[in-house]
Amino acid sequence: ICLKNGTGSHREPGATVYSSVGVMEVLSTRGLRKSMENATAASPAETKAKSRVYGFVDGFNLYHALQDFRHARTDVEKRKYQKYKWLCLNSLLKRYIEPQTDELVGVEYFTSYPTWDTGKKLRHSVYVSALISQGVHVTFGEFKLKTLGCRATCKQEFQVHEEKQTDVNISTALIALADSYDKAILLTEDSDQVPAVRVLKKLHPEKRVLTF
């Protein structure tokens, strides 16, 4: 019986390596029967393919969930979660799957650069580069200016930056990549993805979608 670990082949303590010649002479009848039973019992688990899992991450929602942690009771507790803005998405998503039956085969990250803030854009681009180096595929949207009216007494108009295209990009990827996964993990707080999930289930009822 020859086993293999991370450093190379080795022989299990007390085991014997058998050649194809004279196997019946070496193995006892009881040992042969037990070996065949073990092989038969192990075959279904060994041959069953793992479920392919794809992660879809709304970067904007994830950032603000960590930056403005709503469940924090104090400012100190709130800041405690901000360090996770630099988390590894592969490691995060693997915590939601069973390694014995599931395999993470892809991660899609959707985001936009804050082009009006050089410092933020630089930090975000460094994080995006780190994700890409880990095999994460990144799809960019963009920010656009939106004019709002003050609801207080001044009634003046002002402009804010609003992220665009991310919701559509996520929905499109969820449907377009359906043949690449058996299970999808959708990491977003946005209910705008509900119609896309409904379409996916209609086209591919066998697909499973987990949302967080």
Image (cartoon, grey):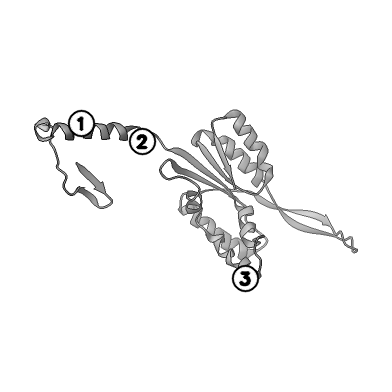
Q: Which residue shows up at 61% across the image and 67% down it?
A: 77
Q: Is residue 8 above or below residue 29?
A: below
Q: Which residue shows up at 57% across the image and 39% down it?
A: 209
Residue pointed to by mark 1: 33
Label whose residue precedes the other's in the sequence (2 or 3) = 2
On the rendered structure, is 95 left or right of 35? right
Mark in front: 3 vs 1: 1
Q: Secondary structure at mark 3?
A: helix
Real-space Cα separation, disc 3 to disc 1, in angstroms: 64 Å
Comparing 33 with 1, the one in front is 33
Q: Quadrant of residue 2?
A: top left
Give the residue type that dot 3 points to. Answer: Val
Q: Which residue shows up at 54% across the image and 30% down it?
A: 206
Give the residue type that dot 2 points to. Answer: Ala
Q: Quadrant of the N terminus?
A: top left
Real-space Cα separation, disc 2 to disc 3, in angstroms: 48 Å
Question: What crowding class fits label 2: few (fewer than 14 Cα within 10 Å), some (14-19), or many (20 or more)?
Answer: few
Label 2 close to label 3 by CB (< 8 Å):
no
Q: Secondary structure at mark 2?
A: helix
Give the residue type that dot 1 points to. Answer: Arg
Residue 101, labelled with which disc?
none
x then y, percent, for residue 119:
61, 66
Residue 76, labelled with which disc?
3
Real-space Cα separation, disc 1 to disc 2, in angstroms: 20 Å
x then y, percent, for residue 82:
59, 64
Comparing 45 with 194, the one in front is 45
Label whose residue precedes the other's in the sequence (3 or 1) = 1
Question: What crowding class fits label 1: few (fewer than 14 Cα within 10 Å), some (14-19), or many (20 or more)?
Answer: few
Mark in front: 1 vs 2: 1
Residue pointed to by mark 2: 45
Label whose residue precedes the other's in the sequence (1 or 2) = 1
